[in-house]
Image: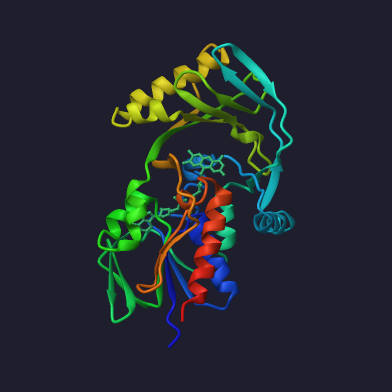
Amino acid sequence: MDLPIAILGAGIAGAAAARELHRRGRSVQVYDKGRNPGGRAATRTREGAHFDHGAQYFTARDPRFLDQVEAWRAAGVVQEWQPRLVAIDAEGTRRLETRERRWVGVPGMRELATNLLHGIELECSQRVVGVEHSAGAWFLDFRNEARRGPFAALLCTLPPAQAVELLANEVVVDPARSVQFGPCWALMLGFDQALPIDFDGAFVNTGPLSWIARDSSKPGRPAGERWLVHAGPVFSQESFDLPPAEVEARLLAAFYSILELAPIAPAQSALHRWGYALAQPPLELGIIADDQRRIALGGDWCHGSRIEGAWLSGCLLAEWASKLA
Ligand SMILES: Cc1cc2nc3c(=O)[nH]c(=O)nc-3n(C[C@H](O)[C@H](O)[C@H](O)COP(=O)(O)OP(=O)(O)OC[C@H]3O[C@@H](n4cnc5c(N)ncnc54)[C@H](O)[C@@H]3O)c2cc1C
């Protein structure tokens, strides 16, 4: 009997694993607790908003991923973003000239996972709360008390703390126990008029912020003036439990301060807290697998903390699963 393979997480890693297994003719079923696929490569589109509030753009170096990017480009799923970039530090602002190509999903970063999962069995808003390995097969339990299974193998692409919680009794999860993940606050700002700023993205090396970008300067986005602000790891950690209104006020003040602008009330403002933003540092194992139990873990935290690494780790998960007897 050809049982399906269960994939936990519909971020880039889970979506890449699903696409590759589907291509190899395997039956897969993907589950994610979020409303949409994408994970941290996300786009906020609620209430008239349009922001990439997680991953901002991606780069590509590995030949396999370069092929994927070219396929996406040809299909209109990604476009190159050529932002005017600066670095802002305590000494001031300097222009950055880089040759690196920066890609974005169109119309948002979420499109990457959506595209990979096209035609694949996916259930969103499904939080997995338990797993059971019985008679050589896997079964999943969900928060809404649903149960799914049997599955031939289990591929888990959850961030490590969540994987450890879910798979506490599995030896395969042991390397994940040591991976530290930092949080990140994201502030989304919309303005009625263009701000007098002559760049589109800034790496910020002073104060509470780490990155700001004119989100509306990315290709294929709705018109408008929208800015995305990411707090740095130290501020995000220290302010993790503060009331959101206080965090928002502090980030907004820092935004105007580094831009040397008089505060203008934004027409739109929303705050998001990424509890698990980036592994510090990631493991460089690709995936972690247990052939006997037919379970494997992957994700960006196994492969470089970036979209490219998440995609490569997903492909490695698929390769591993397709070799199982
Ligand atoms: C603020 C921020 C900025 C970033 N900037 C960049 C950038 O500019 N360039 C870049 O390349 N990368 C960037 N990254 C990193 C990039 O987003 C990640 O490397 C990549 O998206 C990780 O993909 P993944 O599939 O490994 O994990 P995730 O995207 O985290 O996917 C895991 C999925 O598992 C789901 N899940 C978790 N628990 C459960 C459960 N119990 N049941 C069901 N589903 C569950 C989650 O909902 C999620 O969709 C950034 C990340 C953040 C947070």
The quarter of the rendered structure image containing the N terminus is bottom left
Q: Quadrant of residue 133?
A: bottom left
**Of 81 and 310, which appears nearest the observer?**
310
In the image, residue 95 above or below residue 18? above
**Of 187 and 185, which appears nearest the observer?**
185
Q: Position of residue 56 (x, y in %)?
A: 57, 39
Q: Residue at x 64, y 20 (%)?
A: 197
As drawn, the residue found furthest toward the bottom would be: 1
Identify the coloring.
Answer: rainbow
| Residue 194 visible, this angle | no
The mark tally for this picture is: 0
State left or right for residue 152 relative to residue 221.
Answer: left
**Of 3 and 315, which appears nearest the observer?**
315
Q: Quadrant of residue 168?
A: bottom left
Q: Residue at x 60, y 42 (%)?
A: 57
Q: Position of residue 267 (x, y in %)?
A: 50, 27
| Residue 240 visible, this angle | yes
In the image, residue 304 above or below residue 150? above
In the image, residue 308 above or below residue 207? below
Q: Residue at x 67, y 50 (%)?
A: 78
Q: Position of residue 148 (x, y in %)?
A: 33, 73
In the image, residue 215 above or below residue 108? above
Q: Position of residue 321 (x, y in %)?
A: 48, 72
Q: Quadrant of residue 30?
A: bottom left
